Amino acid sequence: MPHNHPHIEILAPVGGSEHLIAAVRSGADAVYLGTQSFNARRNAHNFTDDELKDAVKYCHVRGVRLYLTLNTLIFNNELDAVKKAVINAAKSGVDALITQDLAVYSIAKNLFPDLPLHASTQMTVHNREGAIAVRDMGFKRVVLARELSEREISYINSNLGIETEIFIHGAHCMSISGACYLSQTLGERSANRGLCAQPCRLDFKNKDTDYCLSLKDMSLIPILDRVIKTGVTSLKIEGRMKRPEYVAAAVSQAVNALNCVPADMDTLESVFSRNGFTNGYFVGNIGAGMFGIRRREDAEVSKNVLSDIAQNYRIEKGRVEVSVNFYAKKGENIFISVTDGVNTCSFSSAPPDSALKRPTQEEDVREKLIMTGNTPYNVTKCSIEMDDGLFIPASKIGEMRRCVFDSLTAERCKHKQYVQHTYDECVTLEKSPIHTSQGIVIRAESIYQLKHISSCMEIILPAEHILKNSSECISRAKQMGAELIAEAPEIMFPGDEEKYPVMLKTLWDIGIKAVSVSNISHIAPTKRLGMKIKGSYGLNITNDIALKEYAALGVSDAVLSFELSSSAIASVRSDMGRGIIAYGRLPVMKTRACPVMGKGGCKSCTQKSISDRMSKRLPILCREHKYSVILSPVPVWLFDKEIKNTDYSVIYFTTESPEEAAHVFELARKRASADFEFTRGSFGRSVL
């Protein structure tokens, strides 16, 4: 069941063996799946190491590519296991690894330089500079953020030099991928570790609006003609946790759309929806219409269509087109060959007998040769050269056909042998000296929050705030004896990213020589100007090797992920300076679809928070109407704890008044206990 766009890939989600069959038999060009660890859907059935090998063979026989997800954040005590997982993946013949953590990237790149790597959507690549960054690192493909518009995707793809993949159907995360910490903060189950509990589907409220963090599922299937024109390579369907029938329906309708057959959206909506679908991000219609929940009637409708969909992939329809040649001459061995255009296999048998009664006819042979039902093969050309008057038993023809097709299957099962290099980085990193300095770095929204604070090591302020209030920021930093550091805009969609180099040059000209960055897209432009690069929490650094890779990219020091426990923080080994957020309302989500936008749009917005089911308030910071940052209900407090093996502790101010900021700073300076409601965050937990 090929489609009319051979350069476009339909990529299907696979959570288990039934999903694999459903995806392939429905027409997927490629599938992505995970083994039982280190993948972003650890609650799916997933595959054992042996099942992975079988899955690769199943796909390759049918001309389908298989990509393995190793796309979670990695802790130091898991590096050896990651190395084994990469080796097993390469030995199994997977067509690519999908990765988020730069430790997985480094291990794979060094062990198997020719094993293709795909940059996961968890890397939060949402602009052209980000795509160029991963391209220059050697990634073959980048999975772009779901939040991009048609115009933005087209801009990124222009003369890019790397394959791009976008989601075309399935669940929308409320947060930009890789920037969501809500599940870990509220439920101790990290989305970045593959255990998202989907708290965004719970009833968060915006005034009188319920479920204000629950987006409808996306579907671009009806407008795939527009999607293709953006220059993307791969059309990705979300849903490794969904039913096999869901996979089959989505793949089938995508195939239909690429073949100019109108998609049956009623069936797709019946299989699974949250009160319909949205294409809001792609078409640039971001608003209240994008939100929806899974209703009882949605679930009831699903029951009526699942069995019909399952029937459509129960029997395999040959998708591999082959040509068969059959040769039978008196006194010569019978000869049969088959080719798929790349592999050719042959088989011969004893010479045929002369017919005593009815001789074997050419049509008799043809009928047996094209009998490939419920196999991967479809005979599209059958050439027969045969003398008259011969008798060849039908059973013999069938046996020869089976033998030659078995040989073809064995050839198609063979996969590329990736060349393995020696790489012991993850087990031989020397212990660096224990870091004991506990300087204080303040990150604030505004310089005016700090008017009652006398001194600190460094001050980090949003770059836009510094540029609007440059004289106040510079003079106040001098008074405090602190280095002033600009915080790059955490999210820069195409259009805004073009302004970033100009922003940096202006900062440089007024004397700002260091920038705090939270996304891989920030690094190269900052480095080109010669500015010092400080890594923020958004880089999601959780292990030694990731630190080393970011150092190689030009990062001088970094704030570690706030999803690390105290023991995980202490285990990090590197000469690079590093810190941890020790106070602050943690940014648990960054979202382009604003959860508090009213019918009047941004101009009429007065609400600055949402509330959860326990009526706890989650403040929201608006970033110039381009994206929102949702903060945790209460701040983390670690200043009265011993934070081993770090260089500095960050006070992360957001909504505090100058008086509140001064009080927090005094408590931090004294390493005192907090006298306000707080949480220890992940510090005292064992993160799963």
Image (cartoon, grey):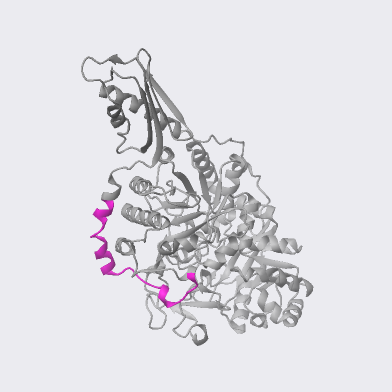
Judge from the rendering whether residue 598 lies leftward or rightward of residue 650; answer left or right.
left
Q: Position of residue 636 (x, y in %)?
A: 53, 70
Query: Between residues 35 and 546, which one lies in front from this camera angle?
Result: 35
Q: Position of residue 436 (x, y in %)?
A: 67, 59
The answer to if 20 sits in the magenta stretch is no
Q: Position of residue 60 (x, y in %)?
A: 44, 39
Query: Between residues 580 and 125, which one lies in front from this camera angle?
Result: 125
Give the vertical position of 424 relative to 594 (above or below).
above
Judge from the rendering whether residue 37 lies leftward or rightward of residue 250; answer left or right.
right
* Quadrant of the frame with the C terminus: bottom left
Q: Position of residue 368 (x, y in %)?
A: 29, 30
x 30%, y 48%: residue: 313
Give the vertical position of 483 relative to 178 (above or below).
below
The number of numbered discs placed on residues in the rendered structure image is 0
In the displayed orientation, state which residue is furthest to the left: 357
Query: Between residues 534 and 641, which one lies in front from this camera angle?
Result: 534
Query: Between residues 304 and 507, which one lies in front from this camera angle?
Result: 304
x 41%, y 49%: residue: 28
Judge from the rendering whether residue 9 lies leftward or rightward of residue 525; answer left or right.
left
x 32%, y 33%: residue: 370
Magenta region, residue range: 283-310
Give the vertical position of 534 relative to 208 (above or below).
above
Q: Is residue 575 visible?
A: no
In the displayed orientation, state which residue is furthest to the top: 331
x 24%, y 54%: residue: 307
Give the vertical position of 606 relative to 546 (above or below).
below
